[in-house]
């Protein structure tokens, strides 16, 4: 579904990604793990077009993502849940969700998508008129994911969904990810919480200093010595 | 208020406004009303951007272009304002795009955007002053009196005609405000003002949305300048352009209320009545006092009434209605 080939990307003269190759097949959940500053968020931003690669190609179902303007990438079926949620804090939950269906293609199915999101996250329905910024961290994460789901995506990019949340809420967020998978979506998830994420995804990539160091199935990664030593602390 | 009730209220209010000059003919008061309507339109134009966090201090520039281009084309080329006004609007729109595009493309936001637009105001003022051979410089400029066809020259002697023109233009401004308020652009711009990245990730073309609202706002402001020029038949760089005029727009829109359609109109009523009262009450002893009062009021408003007078009043009414409604609901429950 999504394929990255020898992608370089960065900010100004600073290069954050080096020769990244990555594949996500339809129906899969894929994790990207690695330490702070490894380039995980940059990887997400380059896929959703918020920054552009300096080299390499990105294709979504065969369509060249690099040649698509950023605001059109959503219509390719890629929805990005940015790091730290990035809700519109002064807007109501309803309006935040409405923004998720901003693309012309999504406006027609707005009511249907809203039902779907409310079914997935009943809590959001209770809070629909509340200002998004006043909700708890976990609820805000639901709202951010809900907003992304409003565009009827095929691929959901989740950037550190557990960041800044209490441990018990982190559990809940990973439960959410499982439910989203069960609804048939393809998920690419970036996480520092390696232990947790490897229990949710099928495959994972380990990224360090902007380069893919290793990849494999979740079980392989859990068993791998490098991952164990560096990230699982065992 | 229900949709129909609101529409009826607007219709009654408008009918009263249209009928007013035929019933009440005091020329001084009509003059003040025309000024209020023209400036209300200018402030409404500014608030189109201002309400989405796009604080521009460059609107004095757009207004100056509207006024001067129209007058210059008439005096030097004999071009009727009916053509001159659209030309001046296009000129202001083009300038808005030239300044806006790089700002939005390269994410010049917040204070930096304010500074860029501040420079724009200053530049337009300087250009008008410096080209004094054509524009009369700081002494001001008067469109030539039409001798034959007054309609072609858009010059009218009676206040009633001007009142109706100003009323129509003001109403058009309010209509545009509401059209935008109901469009998806409003959601896009609110989202952009909160978080540009998140808006872009939701599929908003950030640069295009900002350019669109800037263009609309600049076109309207230029029209306000041109109408002001045609009405007053005398313009100076300081009354239609420059930083002072830009600040006046910011002040009035904030005092009246940025987030409601009639807010800038309320702001215009207050500022113009204040200036007139000071002028009549204190005469030449109080030159510049209105600016002092503006400054103090602006500080007070930003601290205590950030939604402006009309915005705060409407908020209070709304919350009262909500309270009374919950009381009713409770009463119903108890009755059951």
Image: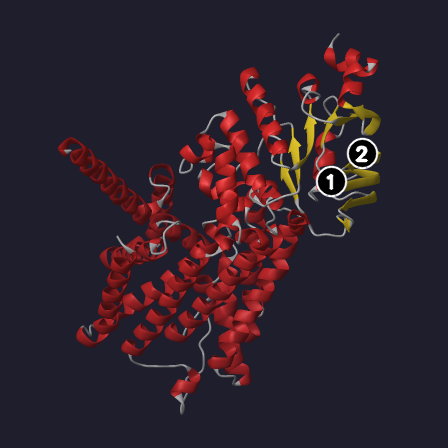
The image shows residue A183, relative to residue B258, as above or below, that is: above
Residue depicted at x 29% and y 47%:
B314
Label of residue A46 in the image: 1
- Mark 2 residue crowding within 10 angstroms, few (<14) / some (14–19) / many (20+): many
Give the quarter of the figure containing the N terminus of chain A.
top right
Chain that bears disc 1: A
Chain that bears disc 2: A
Residue B142 spot, x, y in % from top left: 44, 76
Give the quarter of the figure containing the C terminus of chain A.
top right
Give B15 or A153, whichever is nearer the viewer. A153
CB under 8 Å between discs 2 and 1: yes
Q: Can residue B119 be seen in this view?
A: no
Label of residue A17 in the image: 2
Asked which quadrant contains residue A146, the reply is top right
Asked which quadrant contains residue A126, the reply is top left
Residue A51 spot, x, y in % from top left: 72, 42
Give A122 or B70, whichever is nearer the viewer. A122
The image shows residue B321, relative to residue B150, as above or below, that is: above
Q: Is residue B261 visible?
A: yes
Label of residue A128 in the image: none
Residue depicted at x 40% and y 90%:
B147
Confirm whether circles 2 and 1 share one chain: yes
Residue B304 spot, x, y in % from top left: 33, 37
Label 2 element class = strand
The image shows residue B237, relative to residue A62, as above or below, that is: below
Label 1 element class = helix
Asked which quadrant contains residue A29, the reply is top right
């Amino acid at each position: 579904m999504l394929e990255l080939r020898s992608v370089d990307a960065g900010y100004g003269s600073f290069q954050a990604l080096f020769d990244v190759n990555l594949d996500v097949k339809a129906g899969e959940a894929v994790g990207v793990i690695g330490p702070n500053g490894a380039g995980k968020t940059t990887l997400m931003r380059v896929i959703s077009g918020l920054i552009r690669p300096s080299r390499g190609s990105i294709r979504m179902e065969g369509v060249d993502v690099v040649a698509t303007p950023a605001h059109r990438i959503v219509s390719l079926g890629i929805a990005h849940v940015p790091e730290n949620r990035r809700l519109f804090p002064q807007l109501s939950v309803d309006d935040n969700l409405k923004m998720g269906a901003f693309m012309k293609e999504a406006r027609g199915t707005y009511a249907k998508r809203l039902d779907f999101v409310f079914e997935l996250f009943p809590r959001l329905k209770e809070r629909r008129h509340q200002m998004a910024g006043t909700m708890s961290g976990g609820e805000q994460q639901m709202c951010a994911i809900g907003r992304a789901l409003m565009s009827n995506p095929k691929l959901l990019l989740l950037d550190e969904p557990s960041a800044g949340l209490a441990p018990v809420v982190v559990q809940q967020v990973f439960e959410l990810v499982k439910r989203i998978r069960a609804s048939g979506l393809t998920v690419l998830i970036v996480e520092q919480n390696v232990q947790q994420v490897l229990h949710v995804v099928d495959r994972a990539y380990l990224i360090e200093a902007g380069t893919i160091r290793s990849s494999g199935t979740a079980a392989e990664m859990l068993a791998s010595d490098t991952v164990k030593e560096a990230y699982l602390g065992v | 208020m229900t949709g129909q009730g609101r529409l009826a209220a607007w219709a009654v209010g408008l009918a009263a406004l249209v009928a007013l000059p035929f019933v009440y003919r005091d020329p001084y008061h009509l003059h003040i009303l025309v000024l209020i309507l023209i400036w209300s339109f200018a402030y409404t134009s500014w608030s189109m951007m201002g309400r989405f966090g796009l604080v521009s201090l460059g609107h004095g520039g757009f207004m100056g272009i509207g006024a001067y281009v129209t007058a210059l084309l008439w005096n030097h080329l004999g071009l009727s304002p009916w053509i001159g006004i659209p030309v001046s609007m296009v000129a202001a729109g083009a300038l808005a795009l030239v300044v806006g595009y790089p700002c939005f493309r390269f994410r010049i936001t917040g204070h930096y955007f304010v500074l860029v637009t501040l420079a724009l105001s200053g530049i337009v003022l300087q250009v008008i002053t410096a080209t004094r051979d054509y524009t009369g410089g700081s002494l001001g400029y008067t469109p030539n009196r039409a001798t034959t066809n007054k309609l072609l020259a858009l010059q009218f002697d009676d206040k009633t005609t001007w009142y109706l023109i100003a009323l129509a233009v003001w109403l058009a401004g309010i209509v545009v405000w509401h059209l935008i308020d109901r469009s998806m652009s409003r959601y896009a711009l609110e989202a952009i003002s909160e978080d540009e990245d998140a808006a872009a990730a939701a599929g908003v073309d950030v640069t295009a949305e900002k350019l669109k609202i800037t263009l609309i706002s600049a076109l309207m402001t230029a029209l306000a300048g041109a109408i002001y020029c045609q009405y007053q038949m005398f313009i100076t760089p300081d009354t239609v352009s420059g930083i002072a005029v830009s600040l006046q727009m910011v002040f009035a829109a904030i005092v009246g209320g940025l987030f409601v359609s009639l807010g800038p109109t309320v702001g215009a009523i207050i500022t113009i009545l204040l200036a007139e009262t000071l002028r009549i009450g204190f005469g030449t002893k109080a030159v510049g006092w209105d600016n002092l009062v503006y400054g103090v009021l602006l500080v007070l408003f930003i601290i205590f009434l950030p939604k402006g007078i009309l915005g705060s009043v409407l908020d209070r009414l709304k919350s009262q209605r909500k309270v009374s409604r919950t009381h009713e609901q409770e009463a119903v429950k108890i009755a059951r």
